[in-house]
């Protein structure tokens, strides 16, 4: 059940990114502030019933945040972030799940999910969302995990994104193939 919940959460965030990208790439003509207001309203409607609602932020090719909706902070640049650099040589529509971060606006932990936007008239190059860690960790904590066991979220390249218990997992990378081989069900 936990795997299904985590999968739905990540899939929902990625679907939201693709929806925003589709809206942006279909926008023709000269962009206006009203366009971004309508986009923010649509995102809020899409997130209104979500179990773990996420925010969407938009960035230009230099990594500077484009203010829209309720996100109007100035001077935020993400060009140096791992999740942006991972998209540099990838095609439009590529998605990257980043290593956990501490958010700049409220200092909470989150797992960023970034997408390289299709060319659009608004100049948006990166669409970003982040899944808050706290609700996921609360779900992990409801499970009885005994030593040496653990439960967590691991990226395809083996980086541990979340783990309970969290002992020594920051930046940890595991050999997924070796773990899968060691834990395959063997018939007696």
Image (cartoon, rainbow, N blue to C red):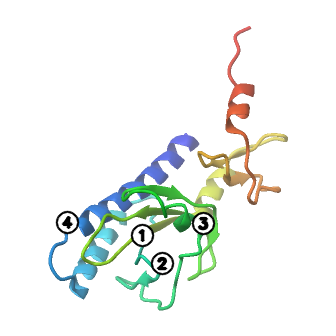
Give the CA distance from mark 1 to mark 2. 8 Å
Badge 2 marks a residue whose secondary structure is loop
Q: Earlier in the sequence, mark 1 or mark 2?
A: 2
Q: Earlier in the sequence, mark 3 or mark 4?
A: 4
The residue at which mark 3 appears reads as 82
Q: Which mark is residue 79?
A: none
Q: Earlier in the sequence, mark 2 or mark 3?
A: 2
Give the CA distance from mark 3 to mark 4. 28 Å
Q: Could you tell me residue 17's position as x and y percent?
A: 38, 61
Badge 4 marks a residue whose secondary structure is helix
Q: CB under 8 Å between callouts 1 and 2? A: yes
The residue at which mark 2 appears reads as 63
The answer to whether residue 16 is left or right of residue 23 is right
The answer to whether residue 51 is left or right of residue 184 is left
Q: Residues within 10 Å of mark 2 (few under 14, many from 20)?
A: some
Q: In the orientation shown, which residue stands out farthest toward the bottom?
A: 74
Q: Could you tell me residue 89's position as x and y percent?
A: 47, 60
Badge 3 marks a residue whose secondary structure is helix
Q: Earlier in the sequence, mark 4 or mark 1?
A: 4
Q: Which mark is residue 26?
A: 4
Q: Residues within 10 Å of mark 4 (few under 14, many from 20)?
A: few
């Amino acid at each position: 059940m936990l795997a299904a919940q985590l999968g739905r959460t990540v899939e929902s965030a990625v679907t939201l990114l693709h929806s925003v990208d589709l809206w942006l790439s279909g926008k023709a003509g000269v962009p206006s502030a009203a366009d971004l207001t309508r986009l923010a309203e649509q995102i809020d409607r899409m997130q209104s019933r979500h179990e773990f609602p996420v925010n969407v932020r938009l960035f230009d090719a230099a990594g500077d945040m484009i203010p829209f909706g309720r996100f109007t902070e100035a001077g935020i640049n993400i060009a140096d972030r791992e999740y942006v650099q991972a998209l540099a040589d990838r095609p439009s529509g590529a998605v990257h799940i980043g290593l956990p971060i501490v958010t700049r606006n409220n200092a909470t932990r989150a797992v960023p999910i970034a997408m390289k936007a299709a060319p659009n008239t608004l100049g948006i190059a990166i669409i970003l969302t982040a899944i808050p860690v706290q609700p996921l960790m609360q779900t992990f904590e409801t499970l009885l995990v005994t030593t040496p066991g653990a439960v967590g979220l691991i990226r395809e390249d083996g980086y541990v994104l979340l783990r309970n218990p969290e002992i020594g997992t920051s930046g940890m990378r595991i050999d997924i193939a070796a773990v899968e081989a060691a834990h395959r069900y063997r018939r007696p």
